[in-house]
Amino acid sequence: MSGWALCQLQVTLHRLKVFMSESRVPFFISGAGHVLPGSGMTTKIIHFLVNGRPEQAEFGADCSAADVKDLFRAAAEAGPHHILKLYNTNGGVVNISPLLEANSEDSYYRLEVVASNLKSVGMPKELDTMEYRLHYLESKVNEDLGKTPTIISDLKSQVESFKRKLESVEHLSWMGLFKEDSDQQLSKLSPKPQTSQLSMHEERQQVRREFLNMSTLQVTEEVREHLKTPIFDNWQWEDAEMLVLLQVMFTDLEFLTAFHIELDVLQNFLFKVYCHYNSIPFHNFRHCFCVTQMMYGLIWLTDLQSKIARIDLLIMLTSALCHDLDHPGYNNVYQINAQTDLALRYNDISPLENHHCAVAFGIMSKQECNILKNLTCEQYKYIRGGMIKCILATDMARHNEILNKFKTMRPVFNFTNKEHKEVLMNIMVKVSDISNEARPMAVAEPWLDCLLQEFFNQSDTEKLKGLPVTPFMDRDKVSKPSSQTNFIRFVLLPLFSELTKLFPCLEQHILEPVRRALEYYSDLERASKEEERTTKA
């Protein structure tokens, strides 16, 4: 049997199993998950636990990512818009894809539905679609083997038996339907023709549909708690899922109730923010999510709700969300040297940060996206002023100025002092913005690769245009370790240390990981220099 046919059969077996189980009709597929005789295809077996029960999935390398996800979705008896995550034995999230590493029964993965509807969701009622699927697979298998395998014959018999049972049921509403019509279901179950790459607009609309479909899901308490920590792994979440988690942040901090934010307006706002981040290596929507998630975590870790007003928390979280809107991938130095429209518009004064603020309030100028529309004039002015200060504070040209202010205030810090509080808010947004090295190395290091890619793109452009080349961005002079050791030593550690003096509880969460990162990159830098000396000798 061809690899494609085997993969499709695996998916059909699991879909049929879920269809039967959701309908409360006992059903067992013998041999499901095992290689069919004569397939000649290299497959891998994945052992995992779902709802406490051991399961296994088997698929080949030529299965698509969507089909592999369907296998696990079926095993979890999850709906099409539910969010699934697979955890390894260490509790880390791993990608559900054809590249998933095979394991043994001694090292089970753990599959969880981390966001789902409160009520159960069943499979579509058009069983004829499943029959069509089986007939189609039968013809494909016959082409390879010259006969119909017993497993397919058994499946066809059980489908017929299941249909006869359904004929005696008077009311079928208990089956529960997906929010898709039969044509959409058929297109999902049938082989898909090759299509051209989606346009940016189509991709974004697809993300919007997925986000809205997922937005009513109940995110598990385990994920909610994990979301409050710096060890959260952003790489395992897709765009629509991250939008759902941003909605969770605004909801859990009770912003919707306190500031009369309508849910659909929040969703429109979040989606427009998503659309206004560009597809560039580093300053993209995923970076926006990470900064917002770190800000959210710091609020919980420091119990900031008990120290400052909720309106200030809204300023900080929304500032983190909007702090790099429409970033072009070229920093302020480039904007000024190249005399770009942004530099001219803002008179060389923090051109990017001013632009980020303008885009944020441009989004909120539309009624359907204005999360501040139900506030008083005074509240709006306060939030706008606070956001502008927080976002402008992310300009690294002002780093020493803001840090020195905080250093002066910190020994006599007073949460009721307006100036003290504003500087703290700026500091916390700054910490969140450059917090990657406070995360586990497996999460942080890929971000460094993204940042260097963006840096090198800028220095290459500077060279082409005859502009001054930014030294720390020059691919001919900068290495991965050297780029980090000085940044950690002279920027991160002084900033994180000062914040930790005000909030000692943060030492284990952000300061110690940054110290470990410095040690890691220092070791790499020493090894690199030693290798250079050996090569020259």
Image (spheres, rainbow, N blue to C red):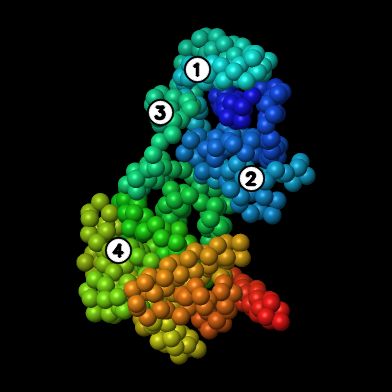
**In the rendered image, which residue does mark 1 sit on?**
132
Q: Amino acid at mark 1?
A: Tyr
Q: Amino acid at mark 3?
A: Gln
Taking the view exactly as shown, the residue that stands out farthest to the right is 106
Q: Separation of disc 1 and disc 3 at Cα? A: 15 Å
**In the rendered image, which residue does mark 3 sit on?**
184
Mark closest to the chain's N terminus, 1 or 4: 1
**In the rendered image, which residue does mark 4 sit on?**
360
* Residue 325 seen: yes
* Whole-percent x, y for residue 116 in the image: 50, 41
Residue at image coords 36%, 59%: 277
Q: Amino acid at mark 2?
A: Leu
Q: Nearer the viewer, residue 113 or 98?
A: 98
Q: Nearer the viewer, residue 494 or 339?
A: 339
Label 3 element class:
helix
Which numbered marker is on residue 89?
A: none
Q: Separation of disc 2 and disc 3 at Cα? A: 28 Å
Crowding around mark 1 (Cα neighbors within 10 Å: few <14, some 14 to 19, many 20+) is some
Q: Amino acid at mark 4?
A: Ala
**Residue 210 occupies which quadrant of the picture?**
top left
User: Does residue 353 sit above or below 110 in this rendering?
Assistant: below
